[in-house]
Image (cartoon, coloured by chain):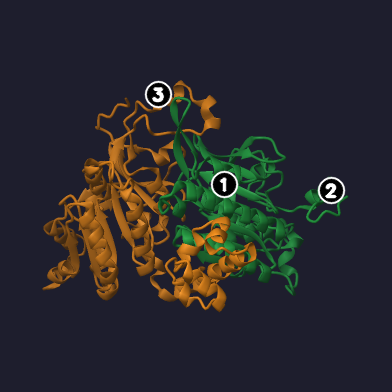
Chain colours: A green, B orange
Amino acid sequence: MGEQSGAQNAWDMLSDEQSQKHITTGSGDLNDILGGGIHCKEVTEIGGVPGVGKTQLGIQLAINVQIPVEYGGLGGKAVYIDTEGSFMVERVYQIAEGCIRDILEHFPHSHEKSSSGQKQLQPEHFLADIYYFRICSYTEQIAVINYLEKFLGEHKDVRIVVIDNVTFHFRQDFEDLALRTRVLSGLSLKLMKIAKTYNLAVVLLNQVTTKFTEGSFQLTLALGDSWSHSCTNRLILYWNGNERYAHLDKSPSLPVASAPYAVTGKGIRDAVSSHHKRARVT
Amino acid sequence: MANMPVSEMRLPPHLAHLLAARRLDTAKDVLSLPEVELMAILDAGLPTARAAVALVSEAACPPCQTALALLEERVRLGGGGRLATTLCGLDEALGGGIPMGKLTEVVGPSGIGKTQFCLKLALLAALPEYYGGLDGRVVYIDTEFKFSSRRMIEIGQKSFPQIFRQEGLAQKMAGRILVTRPTSLADFTKSLEEMKVTLLQHDVKLLIVDSMAALMSLENEKATAGFRQHPLRWTLSFLKSIAEFSRVPVVVTNQVRSQSNDDGYHFSFEVDKKDGNKCAERFDSHLVAALGIQWAHAITVRLVFESHSGHRFIKVAKSPMSPAVAFPFVVESSGITLLSDESIDVTGPEITSIRCQGQNVLAR
């Protein structure tokens, strides 16, 4: 039976799913609603209003994917595709420092270990393992996604691709909306294929727009309904009173749920009101 | 890179000929088409279309850099990539000052001090390096005829009295600030296009647009059915590309308007939470920034100038480098001065709202 090319039986898939690793977000509460963290082999869309922390989370994931295996992480590298110039390198450095500090706090004897073959716990090493592309038009955005297939074949240790954000160029440069829909759906298929083929997480940051539904204007993620069908998981970041919250809006295996999180000097962490006593690294 | 000609890509001859024969001359031409349509146009099979797309993509894709290389480049270029405002608390919150190569927005009700802030920045950019300035020229796009040379020089004399006492310095500084006054979006667009060259040739170190909202409202009045729906989008990406390309800070001022029913506040999954509590909020004198949410997404730093509780505040509402904080300020003869360098934390809906005491704004 399972001899059909490309087909796998559900039992084998189960053991695959169970061994699938997750990338911690830095917040225990957020990890919980995500079933452990951002999943590899899947595309996750993260949307939210300006300033709520999408880029902060994107950068945090690009750092956390690098947490060495001996500390419970994936020990991988990251590709960060920046379409709007949101990537501020000094902030990335700060977040790397925060992550390292938390690792050392949880594994107090680690700095005594020899660093042969292990990643050095220095922010510079974390920055060196983020491959950064700066995209200035939708053509370049399409080009980089297409080129990723070759790039990832040459850099097999990449475990996350972050696109920050998918919306910008497609919102303004495309006059033909029908064509835009077709191009976007082609891109989303490519991204899903990349996630599965190279066993990595694809994280797409998206902006919000307003939509008139049920008699009033509501916030919704940009790029339209057909795009919203194409992502496996969707996380929406929003303000709930004075706190930042994340709402898991779509998932193949987890229930819809919300959790608070915070953006601190060290990066994404649990909200002060969280029941998680300490910021968890793994 | 989008307009990279196919002819320069060094593709295998049969592919190059095929694309040229079908008038697919640039990367954009080839990559804008879905696979199936490309196959149809080329009258070729899937492997050929895929090969063409893969090769064109590789050629058109910008080179990648590691984040470490970016950091080292930033360090090499010096200056920490910031224009210090000399308002110590604000500079600290922003990681040194207004970031270079990014868009910073200054938004607030009229009369609160946005132009005063811009005048001071213009001065700081023009000052020689040994006085803490950027020693460069400034382009000041003044759409509301608010720029006052007299006031700027007064700010200079009061803020840096030792420096400005020097003969001829006031003239030299004023001479470095180029003021243009476009009266329409078309005018503005034209000066921006010319600016790309100016920026490099004339050592421009700061670009100020005061105000952006005024230009946009001019255009909205003239809007006709045939007129391009969103002139803002093009202007937005052009400003961002100028900023990054020339590594110059770009400061844009924005106006405020009262909240309207069109402002969607909530996602559909939040609908149940909408209750009398939220409605009560809207009866306060809360304003929103003009220019909309798309603009808000695109700016890197947002500084909100607002007034409440008898004071004026500069609030860092959006910044990759710091949480939302506010500082009380006043406007004096020496320009904007902070009353305290100790930041006040701002959380929740206060971050995005803009308060203007004394302004009678009731929601409809």
Q: Quadrant of residue B245?
A: bottom left
The mark found on residue B280 in the picture is: 3
Foreground mark, 3 or 1? 1
Could you say whether the residue bearing mark 2 is in a helix, strand or loop?
loop
Foreground mark, 3 or 2? 2
Chain containing mark 2:
A
Q: Find out whether the residues at labels 3 and 1 contact each other: C-beta distance under 8 Å.
A: no
Residue at figure coordinates x 23%, y 64% from the top left: B139
Mark earlier in primary sequence (1, 2): 2
Q: Report which residue position mark 2 lands on.
A: A9
Chain containing mark 1:
A
Q: Find out whether the residues at labels 3 and 2 contact each other: C-beta distance under 8 Å.
A: no
Q: Kindly tell me whether residue A135 is visible in this rendering.
A: no
Foreground mark, 1 or 2? 2
Q: Kindly tell me whether residue B154 is visible in this rendering.
A: yes
Position of residue B18 measured from the top left corner of the image (x, y, whole percent): 52, 71
Could you say whether the residue bearing mark 3 is in a helix, strand or loop?
helix
State the residue in front, A111 or A194: A194
Classify residue B46 as left or right of residue A108: left
Label 2 Cα crowd, 10 Å radius (few <14 / some 14-19 / many 20+): few
Q: CA distance from mark 1 to mark 2?
A: 30 Å
Position of residue B183 measured from the top left corner of the image (x, y, whole percent): 17, 52
Amino acid type, mark 2: Asn
Q: Report which residue position mark 1 lands on.
A: A46
**B201 w.r.t. B350: above or below:** below
**A236 w.r.t. A64: above or below:** above
Amino acid type, mark 1: Ile
Q: How many marks?
A: 3
In the picture, which quadrant includes the N terminus of chain B?
Answer: bottom left
Amino acid type, mark 3: Ala
Label 1 Cα crowd, 10 Å radius (few <14 / some 14-19 / many 20+): many
